[in-house]
């Protein structure tokens, strides 16, 4: 089978410095694999323990608070797969492969792999790992009940139901969203909420700079609200248009249908360029039928 041959090549020891992991759908399962092992994740129960097929489970560690201080992150920059964390791996991979335009294989390269001769730089984009997937999340204002840096993490699809709830929608009205309103940290109606979710920003660096007085406005927002040490964990792949869509719809790519910044839509027989100035205004045309946004 062509897919199996491709996976064998990608998981070969000669590519261990390049390939962090590969994933693909296999019936009711998601298979994750790399040179050190492979595991089967259930699509029917994505949070269930994985079945190890060989070696070790490449996504065994799934702590969303891993490396959530700057000291911890700098102590082990771009850690290899064996020391890395992949929060909600089963849920995020299951969502991607539920989409009509899902890829045959998802390939993630390592954080240390890059092409300096082509202008590349260390680090990767779109990964399943915690540091790449984590975006800073700050909530501030009269309706925010918590203060300071909290040892918690949210998920990007939580943004839409939170916005809708603050605007007056009942939780019952939001039952079709996969995300959850952040009701433990907010109360509706006393006053405005300033919420900041930084695309592509390093949470630890931002919070540390605020604490050191280098970002006084961010520090003032924290004094009047809170930040999540674990940030908001992006859906997979952790790229812009997938997750902007998650934040506005409250569902993952398996429901809303946008699976990358650029992808091939088999049903239409054409490429979708969702992160291109020439075509990004067409984003809403490419949403799966029946998907509501926070504006709706």
Image: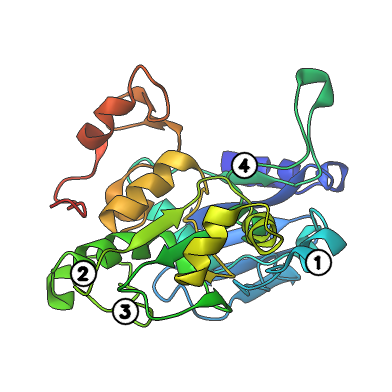
Whether pointer 1 and pointer 3 mark residues with C-beta atoms closer than 8 Å, the reply is: no
Circle 3 crowding by C-alpha within 10 Å: few under 14, some 14–19, many from 20:
some
For the residues carrying marks 4 and 3, which lies nearer the camera in this image?
A: 3
Tell me the distance, in whole angstroms, between the alpha carbons under discs 2 and 1: 36 Å
Mark with earlier residue (4, 1)? 1
Tell me the distance, in whole angstroms, between the alpha carbons under discs 3 and 2: 9 Å
Mark with earlier residue (2, 4)? 4
Whether pointer 3 and pointer 2 mark residues with C-beta atoms closer than 8 Å, the reply is: yes
The secondary element bearing badge 1 is classed as: helix
- The image shows residue 25, relative to residue 101, as above or below, that is below
Say if residue 42 shows up in the picture.
no
Tag on residue 125?
A: 4
Left/right placement of residue 246 relative to residue 177 reads right
Circle 1 crowding by C-alpha within 10 Å: few under 14, some 14–19, many from 20:
few
Tell me the distance, in whole angstroms, between the alpha carbons under discs 4 and 1: 22 Å
Residue positioned 32% across, 72% down in the render? 142
Is 154 or 225 nearer to us in this picture? 225
Tag on residue 165?
A: 2
Tell me the distance, in whole angstroms, between the alpha carbons under discs 1 and 3: 30 Å
Question: Residue 283 placed where, x, y %?
Answer: 28, 33
Mark with earlier residue (4, 3)? 4
Say if residue 173 shows up in the picture.
yes
Residue positioned 22% across, 36% down in the render? 284
């Amino acid at each position: 089978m062509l897919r199996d041959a491709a996976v064998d090549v990608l998981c070969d020891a000669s590519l261990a410095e390049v390939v962090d992991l590969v994933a693909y759908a296999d019936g009711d399962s998601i298979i994750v694999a790399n040179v050190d092992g492979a595991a089967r994740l259930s699509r029917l129960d994505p949070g269930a323990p994985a079945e190890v097929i060989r070696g070790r489970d490449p996504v065994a560690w799934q702590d969303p608070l891993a490396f959530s201080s700057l000291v911890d992150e700098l102590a082990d920059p771009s850690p290899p797969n064996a020391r890395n964390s992949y929060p909600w791996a089963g849920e995020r991979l299951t969502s991607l492969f539920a989409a009509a335009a899902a890829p045959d294989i998802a390939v993630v390269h390592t954080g240390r792999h890059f092409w300096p001769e082509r202008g590349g730089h260390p680090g990767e984009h779109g990964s399943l790992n915690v540091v790449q997937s984590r975006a800073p999340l700050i909530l501030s204002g009269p309706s925010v009940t918590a203060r300071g840096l909290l040892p918690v993490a949210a998920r990007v699809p939580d943004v839409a139901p939170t916005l809708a709830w603050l605007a007056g929608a009942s939780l019952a009205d939001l039952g079709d969203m996969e995300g959850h309103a952040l009701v433990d940290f907010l109360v509706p109606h006393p006053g405005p909420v300033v919420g900041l979710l930084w695309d592509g920003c390093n949470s630890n660096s931002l919070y540390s700079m605020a604490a050191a007085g280098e970002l006084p406005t961010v520090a003032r927002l924290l004094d009047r609200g809170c930040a999540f040490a674990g940030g908001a964990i992006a859906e997979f792949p952790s790229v812009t248009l997938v997750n902007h869509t998650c934040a506005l719809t409250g569902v993952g790519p398996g429901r809303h249908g946008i699976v990358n910044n650029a992808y091939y839509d088999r049903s239409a027989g054409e490429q979708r360029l969702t992160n291109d100035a020439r075509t990004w205004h067409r984003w809403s045309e490419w949403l799966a039928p029946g998907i509501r946004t926070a504006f709706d």
